[in-house]
Image (cartoon, rainbow, N blue to C red):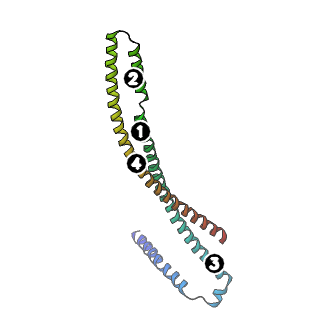
Amino acid sequence: MFKLRSSFALCLFFAATLVPCALAQQTSMPPTPQAASSPEAQLLRALLDEVRQLRVTIQRANINMRQAQVLTERLARQQSRVDSLTEEVEQTKTLIQQSQDTSRDQDELKDLEASINETADPQQRAILIQSYNSMKRAIERQREYASQEAERSRSRQQQLEIALRAEQSKLAELQEQFDALDREFEKQLNETRRSR
């Protein structure tokens, strides 16, 4: 049984090595004038040319598909970066606006001042004046802190906007590459349709 298996394996080995060599010799031999002009030979040659063209087209399509896949992934990541930076810029703008809004504090001071003017009791009035002065100092401190925060936020906003423009530029480049690849696909498709 072992000899039969090894003999069979040896035959397969020889067949695998000899058949391609024989085919290579047949294809490298110049065709006889009768064989070259026969309709079967011409048909075979046309079919082989068609198969070669199809192979080249499929290889090119596979390369382009891989490039399209890579570009699509890069585009998605880049779009995510742009979206994230855009959101950060908007949040920073909102923080700046909120830090500059002191209208509520001013309204509270006005209400307290009105209460002072309406109070006739000197003791109560003194307490309200003390509260008014304390609140005014706290608002001034808060306004100073808000001003510093707003300045830091403006600086951060400028940095974010610079980074956003750079990322948008990269996104535009990737989109151009993707559009060029799309045009190449369209061109190949049209060529394939014309060749049929």
Separation (CA) of disc 4 from disc 1? 12 Å
Nearest-to-viewer mark from 3 and 4: 4
Nearest-to-viewer mark from 4 and 2: 2
Separation (CA) of disc 4 from disc 2? 34 Å
Nearest-to-viewer mark from 2 and 3: 2
Please give the label number shown on residue 170. none
Chain-order first, disc 3 or disc 4: 3
Amino acid type at image mark 4: Gln
Chain-order first, disc 4 or disc 2: 2
Separation (CA) of disc 3 from disc 4? 65 Å
Query: Which residue corresponds to mark 3?
Result: 46
Query: Which residue corresponds to mark 4?
Result: 158
Identify which residue is drawn at 42% across, 33% down.
101
Query: Which residue corresponds to mark 2?
Result: 109
Separation (CA) of disc 3 from disc 1? 73 Å
Query: Which residue corresponds to mark 1?
Result: 96
Circle 1 sits in a helix, a strand or a loop, which is it?
helix
In the rendered structure, the answer to whether residue 184 lies left or right of residue 140 reads: right
* Percent coordinates x, y for residue 43 in the rendering: 65, 79
